[in-house]
Image (cartoon, rainbow, N blue to C red):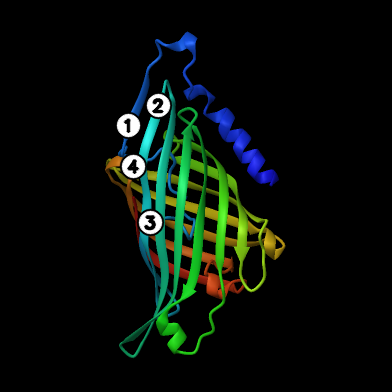
Amino acid sequence: MRYKIIAFVFFSFSIIPFVKSQDSCDLKYNFQLLPQSHIVQLYTADSRAHRLSVQKPINSRGYIGSMGGIFPVASLSHLNKILQFSVASSAYLTLNRWDNKGQVVNVDFFVDLLFDIQLDKNFSVRSGGGHTSQHLSDDALSAGMIQINYVRDYYLLFFNYSSNKKQFYAYGGITYNHNFKTYVDYSGQSIIQLGFEHSPVKWLKNNYLYYAFDLKLREESNFATSNNLQIGYKYALPMKHTARFAYNYFTGISEVGQTYKAINDFTTLGFYFDF
């Protein structure tokens, strides 16, 4: 409950600049439906970010894929402040291959409703809520794997810093799982998340070399971590979209609900499209 109150109070004070008073009738407000770009950058090294991607684990014959994105619906701007509402959805799956055959192991679904506030050219806030349910596929069930229940409903609040001049951004925040059920009930537990991206090398107009890191501390696992390091090349597309080719090194608690609390340590090469 305390997280709900904090999030509500902060969001209420954040939108005060957008409320027109009688003394500010001459100030301009601009409403835009289906804006073309985001005001909060994608969290690059988050291994469950909303994006289109395919990764090849280096030491196995499988693949990790995702289909999805974040889609701005409407924005309201006033002076240098912007309030933007977006919907986001994605599905993550794991594919195992052997002897020219394939098996889909898991399918993990995510849906978020996001409210982003651009405070100035460097700082922004993201709040909202979402749902994820994570399942074994029919292939995995046919192979005799045992499915567990995994569902989370959550609220989130993140603070973001971005510097175009330095090609750097960082974020930190909390995801409060008000409904979290696996083989036991973890409702009321939170995930603390921190991360950054830095692009120290740029050539021509839209080409960058970058590195990024994401850290999640999971309260239900005594704050054990899920860590992902990403190093790669990105090409900046119009409307703040990007195409990437990158190396990933993941360690810590599994992000796959059906292997929940398993400790992973693996590397991948992958292509990513951030929409």
**Mark 2 Cα within 10 Å, few/some/many (few <14, many 20+)?**
some
148 is higher (above) or lower (below) than 124: below
At label 2, the amino acid type is Ser
The first of marks 2 and 3 along the sequence is 3
Q: Nearer the viewer, residue 6 or 271?
A: 6
Q: CA distance from mark 3 to mark 1?
A: 24 Å
Amino acid type of the residue that numbered disc 1 sits on in the rendered structure: Gln
Q: Which residue is mark 3?
A: 51
- Determine the residue positioned at 31% across, 39% down: 34
- Closer to the eye: label 1 or 4: 1
Write down the quadrant of residue 54 in the picture: bottom left
Residue 240 is tagged as 4
Return the disc, 3 or 1, that comes first in the chain's sequence: 1
Q: Nearer the viewer, mark 3 or mark 1?
A: 1
Mark 1 or 4, nearer chain start:
1
Q: Residues within 10 Å of mark 4 (few under 14, many from 20)?
A: some
| Tag 2 near tag 1, CB within 8 Å | yes
Give the residue number, with chain letter if any, for mark 2.
Answer: 77
Q: Which residue is mark 1?
A: 32
Local secondary structure at mark 1: strand
> In the image, is 27 to the left or to the right of 228?
left
